[in-house]
Image: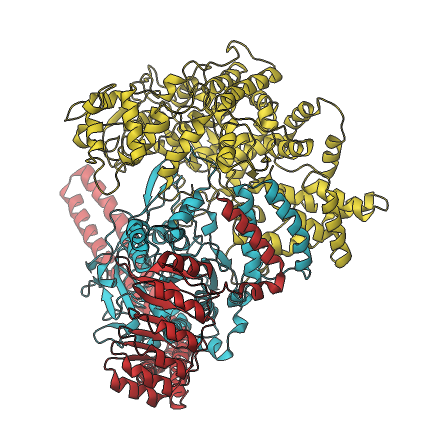
Amino acid sequence: MSMRRILLGSVFLLAALAGSKLHAQTKDAPPYKPAANADEALTRIEELGGIVRRAAPKDDALEVDFRNSTVTDAHLQYFHSLKMVTVVRLRETRITDAGLVHLGKITTLKRLHLEKTAVTDAGMQHLTGLKELDFLNLFGTAVGDAGLDHLKALPKLKSLFVFETKVSASGIAKLQMSIPGLQVVPDPVQDRQRAEAAWKLAKSALDEAERKLAAVKKDAEESAPKAAQLKRELDEATKKSADAKKKSDDANKKWNDAGKRANDLKTPEAKQLAAETKKMFDEAQMAFKSAQAASQATQQQFQKASNAKKLAEEAQKHLESYRILEEDARKRLASFTRGD
Amino acid sequence: MSQPRLNVSRRDFARLSAAGVLSGVSVPWFETLAQAASIRRPRGKNCILLWMDGGPSQQHTFDPKPGGEFRSAATSVPGIHIVEQLPQLAQCMNDMAILRSMQTQINDHYDAKYYLHTGFRRITGFEHPAIGCIASHQLGTPNDDMPAFVTIDAGYDIRNDGGRLYRSVPAYLGPQHSPLAVNEPSRGLENLRQANSDLDARLEMLAGSEQRFAREYPLPAVSAQQSAFNRAVRLMQSPRARAFNLDAEPASMREAYGSHRFGQSCLLARRLIEAGVSFVEVFHRGWDDHNGAARNMILRAPWLDLAMATLIRDLKQRGMLDDTLIVWMGEFGRTPGDGNGHFSNAWSTMWAGGGINTGLVVGRTSERGRNAGGTVTERPITPPDYIATLCLALGIDIRQEFHAAGSRPMPVADHAAQPIRELLR
Amino acid sequence: MFRNLKRLAIYAIGLPMVFLASPALGDGQESLLERDVLPILTKQCLGCHGGLRQKGGLDMRTIPLMLKGGKSGPALKVKDASASEMWKRIAADEMPPGDKKLSAAEKNHIKQWIANGLPTVAERQKNDAPLLSEKEKHAPKEVAAAIDQHLNKGLASAKLKSVPPGDDAEFLRRVYIDLTGRVPTADQAIAFLDNKDADKRAKLIDALLATPQFGEQLGRTWRDWICPPELPSDGNGGAQPHKEAQNLGKWMGERFAAGDSWNKITREILTVDGEINKKPQVIFFGLVGDGGRLTPDGSARAVASLFMGVQMQCAQCHDDPYRDWAQQDHWALAAFFSKINGGFNKVSESPTPKNSTQITIPKSAFKNSGTIVQAAFLKGKTFNLNKDEALRPHFVDWLTTKDNPYFAQSFANRAWFYFFARGIVNPVDDFRELNPPTHPGLMKLLTNEFAVSGFDVKHLIRCICNSEAYQRTSRVTGGTDEQTVAALTAAYGRMPLRVMNADVLYDSLKAAYGDPKLDLRAIDAKDNIAGQSAPIADAYLEFLRRFGTNKEDATDFTHGIPQMLTMINHPRLLSGSKALDSHRKMTPTPSPEQTVEWLYLSTLSRRPTDQEQAEAQRYLKRTENGYIGVLWMLVNRSEYLLVR
């Protein structure tokens, strides 16, 4: 444990104690002091609450993450002392167009996050030198079509984020003409297409569910009166089956006795009797089996008939789910038609 | 048991390796980077794990079969089909990857939950850290205002509980990597709000004695206690902690995620990631459909489809999807056909965003026969493969080793793991 | 526990410091095997030339093995580094292969060590004999004095000066926490602080050892040593035997409180036969087994670690890469536990037929599965039965004899670890030749005294608590540098500052709030218990889970945001204290100053300083919350959560 950390502990406690004043304090960033070299620049960046990482595992390229830091425009001059910076994250920081002047000089930059900052159309002109830039996030900024116009100069731009900005569909379309392969998010055309496809799918599922419901309902309606009749048939069949079983059991017993006797006496008469009783048992058993099968079949029919109602209820419940699916998809599609 | 050592906190060494890469160096920095090659800091990736506790059916979600209970439907990626009950999600397929060849061996709920959260089989007398805790250790910024790992309980609809809920345990990574739990998304974080009004006065009364005590006892335990205390107070006062409060979200956005508790949990997860949390696990319970998967899945489909599709689209339009991996899974799948039973032999998970390769399917299950989907026919994925891939996708070095009790070297992912290369860029 | 890949590096720098104050090690200039060379070998060599792999036929775990060498002949030539194969390869950076080579300092250690004739710590320390005879039991104060003599010898040889004794308040709170598992009440504190008896400390130790809380605290400490807070469970549903584990702790506590000897308690656990509702200790084998099943290897591992002080877990699957345990040793021990059946609820052992005390190494071990191993006492003779009998009693007979090389020293070392946050042998379950004690004479002294007293637990603890070492302050004199503080603590020249464990914190908070059912679970969770929320365990389990501490190092503060938020904001901690209410009722017209003083006494076990009193009074004038705000402040103090 270094003494440095112990001191830090106390500092934090003091800061915490300032209560609501805390944020005012932490927002007071250390002023910009020129960094003599890369090391110093890194140290200063970390003091501001920035984080430096490798941009990719097997690469010397760096990512500088200023989210939740106290960075201001002037601090971006630290990038002059760093090489190979390819990713810069400035989400929700206090930087403005003035800071973009410094960022515009990081010619290695591939990915830039400016979302929820105060940058505007005017600032975009400083980015035109970023020939490697392929990802630019402007979500939640005041940038509009005029700013987008400057971005034409970025040949490698592949992903542009303009959610909650002043950018219009035509502005997007114009930029996409200049930079082939550029994906803009949100993309109103594509999003609408997908919303439509989703709705079509949901609609078809709903239709199918309705068809299914109609079928089971029909089943249920048809089988309701049948159920009573089937119940009577089932009782009868069950009784028949039970009778046949009794007969079969009796025959079995007779055959057992006769067989035993034949074994004891070993007379031809006895043997003959045994053979006859065996035959009678076989017949009785066969009758029982067929009565049993008939009873089971009736049982199934009856079950089906009485289940049909339950099935219809369940299908009705499920239809609700399909309705919601369809409704949600329709709402989303409608939002594009309204031009949201 | 630990080895003989100084009264120097081990966590300092962890911190040195995590944060010290670039701080306080006095040699030219390129050289430093070269030297630090083995302890490089992971990229700024985050993860939202959507855990369907009990085991969701693959044939009723992402791996429909001809003649199955659910019809399959085309997605926005030609050639890839999922069930028709997820229409909006189907249109997000470009940003999704389906893993259809999970082969995970364990059919018991709890052991499977453990295996799929850690990449190691559960054994007695030893604990492996959960993926969320690993992410907290590896991706979290030490001493940040926000916690690195948060779990959100999205409740249940149908009480088909799959046994005891798995709790993410940090094991040898240290309790500071335990998750913070949100028990009810609409209420935010437990104990975050001041229980009484005069906190400032109480803190002021506390401050003097704390400073005197720290001077009298300039020792690691004291500074660690004070710094944890200060972090908690800072979190309470931080504007970033507003992320825990769903009421701060515009009504239109709350509606877009759906009013279901799962949708609101997904929205909370997005807010937390946006505020700097590295790993959020949302668990929804009651997926152990022993009474048939179809009837329950159709009831879940509306909120599941809406919440997940909105989550993907919302992250995307904020430019966060590339940095945020969404993982949807349970501890296993369900038996082919009706989905009544547990099934670990061939099941599906779904990943989205995160800068992985998307718009694709990994692995394949059998198509024909009475037991279609009963076997993996291409690229079986084991839990070690799975966790290793997850770590790599988050930028975590899987070859690094930790030392657990008894000098036992423990790799982040099992040595036998074969990461799913086709997912990684 | 919380080690990163740097742990071995910690080993490397930690070990020399620990041995700094070892008597008879001189000035620390000489390179010694265990202190200087072994950390390098462990980090760089044993992975490939140890128990797991022997590349080139070479095993470097012990000096004889290195002298024997591998395919290229002996690795070492005594007193001649340049003729030693090992040095030649290291010097040329041929070894270790890969990027990470030995530093100049590390190389120098190896070279010096060979040149000086392979000296070891053990050899240098062999004359450090115990100061008391092993033939009879001694009076606690006599033993305490001998403990201090041993430690002072070490301090002197390291040229360290111990800190002064702690004041009465410091001792009071520490000894209450250690011996009863909670801070003293205000009344208890006043009684001690205002007592003028010169012998009051010894008397307090005696009094606390006689309380049931002493047993309760030691019992739950052992429960925590036996099992982690997340318990094993049966596969599918995952129900954990929490109640049963707690009952095991309670049962052990009752035995300790009753003064049962350690050999008696050990026998009752290890030879248990029957049902859990009659014998709570039945759960032991389930807890150390696998998913509720009793496993011979789980039992062997636990018995080795808890009752013998040796680590066997690596040897389960293969020869230990770092220690001199063979896989055979592990399974020979496991054989004694291979004939028991049962689960969480019962344990039974039918007699083993004579001449069949073998075990087969199962498939799960990745080396030598299928090999048949004969039961044997660790590093001793093999064991067979000449008539049909249960096996475990024979093992316990061997284990609990007075002269058993493991049993007494293992417990004595754990007891020392409990009070000083570090064992004389460290880790506490890693006794072996190449991990020597920092104070061999003291280790023998404690072992002998414990054995000759008939394994009298209270006697051993009484001896330790009466020592000056235990009663020293934990305060650091201003301006002492970090290195010196570490060295002083390692030499027991100062008491370490420890973190209250969950049980102690919970009981202390309950007392401070006068609420035996104090519940700090999430309010949300409780509201929702019938609705759609996660299953939350009972208040005690939830507290244990939340406020668990580092069991291997009590000086390591590991609480983070969830724990601090609970302390800061849980409504219960601001909603009134019954203890305070009843105090105010009992005390006629107390002044605000008296009440604040009472609150300090019941939490920090001392009276407030003038400044503290003034700060509290200033607060009381400013707010309507009143005394509960002061109590909140006190339980949120780092001084409260720590054991000075």
Chain B image colour = cyan
Q: With respect to residue C554, does A290 lie above or below?
A: below
**What kind of colouring is applied to the model shown?**
by chain
Where is residue A257? Give x, y as percent.
25, 44
Q: Which chain is red?
A: A
Above or below, A127 relative to C530: below
Q: Whole-percent x and y of residue B153? A: 48, 61
Question: A33 or B308: nearer the eye?
Answer: A33
Q: Which image quadrant is residue A288 in? A: bottom left
Q: Horizontal placement of C210 versus B146: left or right?
A: right
Image position of C68 with respect to A24: above or below: above
- Colour assignment, chain C: yellow
Quadrant where the N terminus of chain B sits is top left
Quarter of the picture containing the C terminus of chain B is: bottom left
Q: Nearer the viewer, residue C564 or B84?
A: C564
Q: Is residue A111 left or right of residue C406?
A: left
Q: How many marks?
A: 0
Visible residue check, residue C450: yes
Residue A55's x, y, as percent?
31, 62
> Which residue is depicted at the point 21% across and 35% down?
C95
Q: Residue furthest right?
A: C588
Q: Is residue A303 visible?
A: no
Is residue C452 shown left or right of residue C63?
A: right
Image position, residue B185 (x, y; %): 51, 66
Name which residue lies at 45% across and 73% down. Answer: A95
Where is B186 relative to C640, above or below?
below
Tell me which corner region of the image, top left, top right, bottom left or bottom right, holds residue C509: top right
Whether residue B219 sits left or right of residue B410 in the image: it is: right
